Amino acid sequence: MICQNAENEVLKIFTKGIFCYDFTICFKPRSCSPDNEDIADRNNNLYGFAEDKLQEAEDYARIFSDKPIAWTNLAGLYYERKELNKALDAYKEALKLDAYDSNTYAAMAQCYYRSAKYDVAYKYYDYAYQYSNDYQTKMQFRYMLGVCDIALGDFDEAYEFLKEVNTY
């Protein structure tokens, strides 16, 4: 059944703060505040630590190329540096080694979402949902599926996802 006021209902649920988080918090501690993100970026770049971390992660991925964690760590640093294509490439390497890691799919989805490729982000959040074994994590992925639907303008489907998450 299509809800006549789906857009309004979605916005009510969405703004209610069901989870009230930037999904990247699952991968690194960070406040949703843009001011805090700027501070974190400046702190990471102090004294060249960011470059050292990146070089170390690249070396680690080269030496331990058979370990998914090496690739996801490298991808996370690329993501922090806003080098999303490089992050996606590293996540793809991790998936070659572990094709069922829901967190890697979710991280890729976040890269696509941040690149405004909401339809692709939706697909990867759906994979993350399918491969997750934890109910709470599954609900977080359902929430992000609803967020992608909002970005895509599909308020009826977003309403269904967010309603389901809201009852959790």
Image (spheres, rainbow, N blue to C red):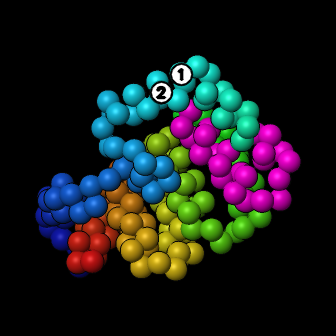
Q: Which amino acid does label 1 sit on?
A: Leu
Q: Name the residue under label 1.
A: 46
Task: Provide residue 152's location: percent of width, then percent of height.
Answer: 37, 53
Q: Nearer the viewer, residue 35 or 119?
A: 35
Q: In the rendered structure, does residue 143 fall within the stretch colored magenta?
A: no
Magenta region, main secondary structure = helix
Circles 2 and 1 in contact, beta carbons < 8 Å: yes
Q: Is residue 156 visible?
A: no
Location of residue 158 by image quarter: bottom left
Q: In which quarter of the image is the C terminus?
A: bottom left
What kind of element bears circle 1? helix
Image-based side of 75 in relation to 41, left or right: right
Q: Say few, some or many: other residues with alpha carbon within 10 Å of mark 2 (under 14 / 14 to 19 / 20 or more).
A: few
Q: Which of 29 and 6 is in front in this view?
A: 29
Q: In this view, does 3 lie above or below 148?
A: below
Give the mark count. Answer: 2
Q: Can residue 136 be seen in this view?
A: yes
Question: What are the residue bounds of the magenta stretch?
Answer: 58-81
Q: Is residue 100 above or below residue 23?
A: below
Image-based side of 128 in relation to 155, left or right: right
Q: Name the residue under label 2.
A: 43
What kind of element bears circle 2? helix
Q: Which amino acid does label 2 sit on?
A: Asn
Which residue is drawn at the image coordinates 57% and 53% (left, top)? Answer: 108
Q: In the rendered structure, does residue 79 fall within the stretch colored magenta?
A: yes
